[in-house]
Image (cartoon, rainbow, N blue to C red):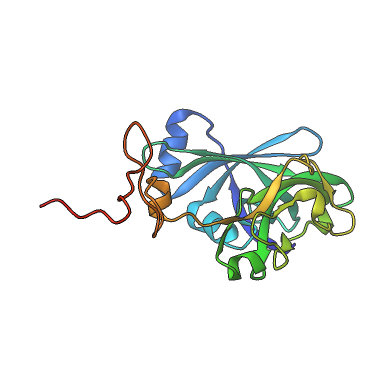
Amino acid sequence: MEREKLAVRLREGRGTKDARELRATGDIPGVIYSSSSETTAIAINARDLRRAVAGPSGIHTLLDVTVGGAKAVRVALIKDLQLDPVRDRVIHVDLHEIRMDQRIQTVVAVHLEGQPHGVTMGGALSQPTHSVNIEVLATEIPESLTIDVSGLEIGGTLRLADVPLPEGVVLLDDAESTVVAAVSAQISEAELAGEPAEGEVAPVEGGEAEQPEAGGEAEE
């Protein structure tokens, strides 16, 4: 996984008033939790944060964080984002510093590739699972899990248990019950509405459909 640089600054005030003033200037209050359980109050420029997580890994991007202009780099992951429910903007960020020689738990996106044979035959592809939880060394986090679905037929499903994993990656989700892709037969609007297919006779209420008498004449 590629790493993105993120420069932050130390934050002195930690009250509601200070946080409100920070947001008014385009910054976001946050905290870095270190491996030694120490915390550092920081402020992050909102545009810098958006740029850092704009890649394919999104908010699960591995970050090279520099604090207050220091030369030392602290490798971290975003552990929590608090959003304003009204304005839908980030109002607080929690970063968790990690050690590169230790296994960590994180989330990676699931990417489907290939044209399923069932879709070619008229089926519809669905993707119930878009991300999975894994455990892996920080240096070996994959950009995503890319899954080939070209062999799926109509009615076929692909589960996590069927997916080959990169070396060193351990799934934390239930591999047998988690469906990542499925191809189903498409249903027409007429079938959904219960209408008869072309050539069929609709049944009348309370019995079978009336059939014309053989050789009978139509009434005037």
Can the viewer see residue 84? yes
Looking at the image, residue 89 lies above or below residue 127:
above
Residue at 80% over, 56% down: 163
Residue at 55% over, 49% down: 44
Residue at 79% over, 41% down: 172
Residue 137 location in percent, x, y?
85, 51
Q: Quadrant of residue 144?
A: bottom right
Looking at the image, residue 45 lies above or below residue 85:
below
Frontmost residue, 153 versus 99:
153
In this rendering, would 178 be left or right of 16? Answer: right
Residue 32 location in percent, x, y?
67, 41
Residue at 66% over, 62% down: 112
Q: How many labels does the image show?
A: 0
Residue 57 location in percent, x, y?
65, 58
The quadrant in which the N terminus is found is: bottom right
Frontmost residue, 96 versus 154:
154
Can the viewer see residue 116? no
